[in-house]
Each structure stands twice: as structure tokens, then as C-alpha cells.
Amino acid sequence: MIAAYALTEPGSGSDALGAKTKAMATANGYRLTGVKRLIAYTTRLLQQREPAEIRRKQQHLETFADMIIDLYAMESAVARTAKLIRRRGEEKVKFERDLIAVFLADATERLCGRARRLFGNDTGGHDLERHLANVAQLTPFLPLRVLDARTRIAEHVVGAGGVLA
């Protein structure tokens, strides 16, 4: 079995750990930074295993696949929201910005939790402490005002008669 992964990010070239991704609100939408580095870092752990051992650890591969899926969904959601902001303007996409803020916060928590589970399963002692510290350093995202955004989303849907408008 051959394991492979592909990440693209301006400025990192072939250095996957040079990718710099976090989810941050900006004046024009949201920007991801830190997440790609977390996935690249986790990939290194999987690539260091013997191929036969990886085959016996299907849950590791499933967890890693879930991380890649979340990253893809995050990037897609950010791109879609940025496109809406360019088309409609900042003021007309407040609802969508709330949606993306909540989604990015939840997806980032899922990614960090999955990485911690992988490292927690395969390492211990000082190595585990180092890996967990690296996970925290690679994803310094704080989900600011997410509960307020959830409230606005619920109020919007209730106000629209239960329909996403």
C-alpha cells in the first residue's frame, strides 16, 4: 500500500509543513491558516508507519480521510462565501458569514480532535506531549462569538418561517 497526500498553498512549494493555514475573519470574508499544516504534520505520522501496519490500522486512515474531507469543505465554504461577498457586498451576506463562522469553528475543533486521537493512540510520554503541543501551535484558532452567530442563524431561520432563505 502506498500512502500519498497533496496540499497546495501559495508560498509553500513542495514543503507541506511550510503551508500556513488558520481560519480568520477578515474584512472581505474568512481566511484559512494552520489547518493544512496540521494535516501535513499528521500525515508524517502515518507515513512513518510500515505499510503493513497501516493496513491493519484502517481507523487511522478513515480518521485521516475525515480530516482531508473537512479541509476540503472548509476551503470550499470559504471560497463560496468570499464569492458572495464580492457579488453582493459585505452587508448583504451577514447570514452567510455567520454560517461560515460556525462551520469553521466546528470543523477546526473536529480536525484538532482527530489529530489528538491519532497521536494519543500511537504515542505516549514526551512524544505525545510534543505532538499535542504542536497541534495546539498549528491551530491557534479561537472560535470568537460563535454562540452569538448561532443565535443569529436560529433567529433568521425562525423569522423566515423555518426556511433557509
Image (tube, rainbow, N blue to C red):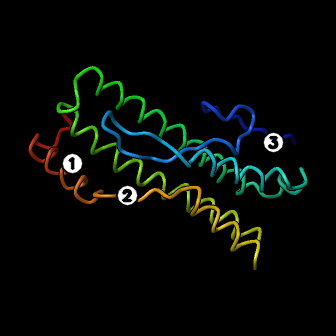
Q: Residues within 10 Å of mark 1 (few under 14, many from 20)?
A: many
Which type of secondary structure does the marked residue at label 3 adopt? loop
Residue 137, image x, y percentages = 58, 61
Q: Is residue 162 left or right of residue 58?
A: left
Q: Disc 2 or disc 1, which is closer to the eye?
A: 2
Determine the secondary structure under disc 2. Answer: loop
Looking at the figure, which quarter contains the C terminus? top left
Instruction: Identify residue for label 2.
Output: 143
User: The residue tagged with tag 1: helix, strand or loop?
Assistant: helix
Asked if 53 appears above or below 103 in the picture, the reply is below
Q: Are marks 3 and 1 in contact (CB under 8 Å)?
A: no
Quadrant of image for the N terminus: top right
**Residue 156 appears at what percent x and percent y?**
15, 44
Which of the marked residues, 3 or 1, is nearer the chain's N terminus? 3
The relative height of residue 62 versus residue 79 in the rendered view (above or below) is below
The 10 Å Cα crowd at callout 3, few under 14, some 14 to 19, many 20 or more, is few
Residue 159 x, y percent position in the rendering: 8, 44
| Residue drawn at (55%, 54%) of the image | 111
Q: Amino acid at mark 3?
A: Ala
Residue at 34 percent across and 32 percent down: it is 81
Residue at 59% x, 48% y is 66
Q: In the rendered image, which residue does mark 3 sit on? A: 3
Looking at the image, residue 130 sits to the left or right of residue 81; the answer is right
Q: Compare residues 126 and 157 and report the one nearer the observer.
A: 126
The circle on residue 153 is 1
**19 relative position to 72: left or right:** right
Relative image position of residue 42 (x, y in whole percent): 70, 54
Tell me the amino acid under the disc marked 1: Ile
Gap in Å between the C-alphas at discs 3 and 2? 33 Å
Q: Quadrant of residue 91?
A: top left
